Amino acid sequence: MIKHSHGDGVDRLYKNCCNRIIGGIKTGGKRYKWHLSTVQGILRNEKYMGDTLLQKTIITDFIEKTRIKNDGTVPQYYVKDSQEAIIPRDVYMQVQEEMVRRANMTSGIEGKKKRVYSSEYALSSICTCTKCGDIYRRIAWNNRGKKSTVWRCCTRVEQGPKACDAPTVTEEELQQATVNAINQLVHCPDSMIQTLKENIEIAMVDDNSGEMEKLNAIMLEKQKKLVNLAHAKKDYGLLADEIDILRDKKQELLIKRAETEGVKKKVTELADFLKGVPQELAEYDELMVRKYIDQIKIYEDHFT
């Protein structure tokens, strides 16, 4: 399966943050110690793509200047292109999509096993066992004094061969398989690439803009009602919960839109890549795997 990785945006921003830590740069709170929540806050901050969400927090005590998170007490307003962006909008949206995907990563036939995403190696989290559905893990193996690097099914590693008897695969085999897969693409005729582009463009026609407009209208109406209830000092808790649900729904639509735009961009980049490659890959390339290989299914005697 071929893809353009959404993860490179997350990884790039995260590494930039880590570089700042090493460089002695202070956080927004004027501290030298960076926490995971600080980095996550940067990745989720819409200001980086040029937008602003007004009234994230509100002042409850004007004398003491007590500021709390806005739970729906007052309406929030989203202003698009309010300042110059320092991150492309499509990269920001792909980062949000990738964070959701990594936070909800599961494996197994029924998808019930929670797995932690790893970006240390390009092959991490993309190699899947076709017997139990779990992912493969990189292991430094010492088999009767012979040291090697292999990939093994997590279920087999954790529960033994009775739970899953999936084969152990050498890292060299997996790496060579990715080289072969990418080299097959180099030989794709122009007609096949054009057909691929046309099929995906047809599938991506609906960008959910109509649904987004309806959702925004409903949210605006409910926010007005909430403000009226707050001014009348009436209970607005139920309405605030409804607004939170709508806000989550809006986030899902934004992620789907990012996926749509991302797919269109993937196809264009893939076509450009194929036109620009003069010869086959001679050796394994981590960057190429991160960018173009979506999944490797491991069978008893072959890969797909």
Image (cartoon, grey):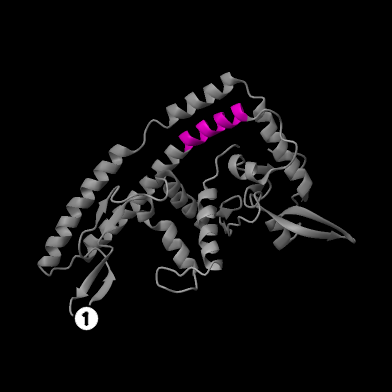
Image quadrant in which the N terminus is located? top right
Q: Nearer the viewer, residue 106 or 146?
A: 146
Location of residue 155 (image quadrant): bottom right
Looking at the picture, how far across and down is residue 300, in whole percent? 76, 43
How many residues crowd around disc 1 within 10 Å: few (fewer than 14), some, or many (20 or more)?
few
User: Residue at (53%, 53%) from the top-left corner?
Assistant: 12
> With respect to residue 303, does 53 lie above or below?
below
* Element carrying mark 1: loop
49 sits left or right of 109 in the view: left
Furthest residue in direction right, as rendered: 145
Residue at which label 1 appears: 64
Image quadrant in which the C terminus is located? top right
User: Residue at (48%, 24%) from the top-left corner?
Assistant: 198
> With respect to residue 28, does 178 lie above or below?
above
Q: At label 1, which amino acid type do we have?
A: Glu
58 sits left or right of 90 in the view: left
Looking at the picture, how far across and down is residue 248, in whole percent? 34, 54
The magenta region covers: 263-276
User: Residue at (19%, 65%) from the top-left corner?
Assistant: 236
In the rendered image, is residue 163 in sight? no
Q: Nearer the viewer, residue 264 or 18?
A: 18
Q: Is residue 269 magenta?
A: yes
